[in-house]
């Protein structure tokens, strides 16, 4: 059975460095540029929820918060009543994704500040022209 005929197109403008980066990625995947771009666009997440890195970092930051609070209290020889412990857990869980996003954004900003122009192009999100939306 033949795949459905593709009759529509999507276009965008990219810099020379971005174009070279896209070509390298397509070549690395063993695909033509158009095929690689189509696959990348169609496999992009439909919603912009937290990615797996943010989720994992958020959990680690929440555990860190709990550990530091518990260790500090234990070092002072103090017990933590259950209601206070539940409050600590709720507070750690309530801010974990936001804190993870802040940390990841800071790392990306620092990385961009020290990146070469070609590396910076890799992190640039390609945006569609308004008429292409």
Image: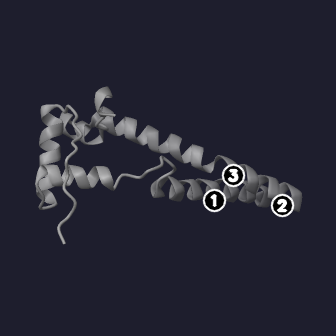
Quadrant, the N terminus:
bottom left
Give the Cα separation between the discs numbered 1 and 3.
8 Å
Question: Disc 3 designates what residue?
Answer: 92
Left or right: 125, with 103 as reference point? left
Left or right: 24 in relation to 86? left
Front-lying residue, 76 or 87: 87
Of the image marks 2 and 3, the number of the one nearer the N terminus? 2
Q: Residues within 10 Å of mark 1 (few under 14, many from 20)?
A: some
Q: Which mark is residue 97?
A: none
Residue at the location (45% across, 39% down)? 105
Q: Dot 3 lies on which element? A: helix
Q: Residue 19 at what x, y percent from top left?
A: 14, 39
**Residue beneath label 1, please?**
63
Question: According to the image, label 2 marks what residue?
Answer: 77
| Above or below, comparing residue 63 to residue 9 in the picture | below
Residue sitting nearer the eye, 7 or 106: 7
* Mark 2 vs 3: CB contact within 8 A: no
Q: Can residue 76 be seen here?
A: no
Q: Are marks 1 and 3 in contact (CB under 8 Å)?
A: yes
- Number of disc labels: 3
Q: Residue at x 81, y 58 (%)?
A: 86
Question: Can residue 127 be seen?
Answer: yes
**Residues at marks 2 and 3, CA–CA distance in whole angstroms:** 22 Å
Q: Secondary structure at mark 2?
A: loop
Label 1 and label 2: CA atoms lie apart by 21 Å
Identify the residue at horizontal 58%, vertical 49% (top origin): 97
Q: Position of residue 24 (x, y in %)?
A: 12, 50
Observer-nearest of 71 and 66: 66
Q: In this figure, which colouring scheme has been used for the structure?
A: one colour
- Quarter holding the C terminus? top left
Which percent across, then down, holds residue 110? 37, 36
């Amino acid at each position: 059975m033949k795949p459905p005929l593709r009759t529509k197109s999507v276009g965008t403008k990219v810099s020379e460095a971005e174009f070279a980066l896209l070509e390298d990625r397509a070549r690395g995947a063993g695909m033509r540029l158009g095929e690689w771009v189509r696959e990348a666009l169609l496999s992009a997440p439909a919603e912009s929820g937290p990615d797996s890195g943010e989720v994992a970092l958020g959990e680690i930051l929440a555990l860190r918060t709990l550990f530091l609070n518990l260790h500090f209290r234990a070092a002072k020889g103090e017990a933590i009543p259950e209601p206070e412990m539940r409050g600590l857990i709720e507070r750690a869980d309530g801010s974990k994704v936001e804190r993870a996003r802040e940390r990841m954004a800071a790392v990306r900003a620092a990385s961009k500040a020290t990146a070469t122009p070609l590396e910076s192009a890799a992190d640039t999100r390609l945006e569609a022209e308004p008429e292409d939306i």
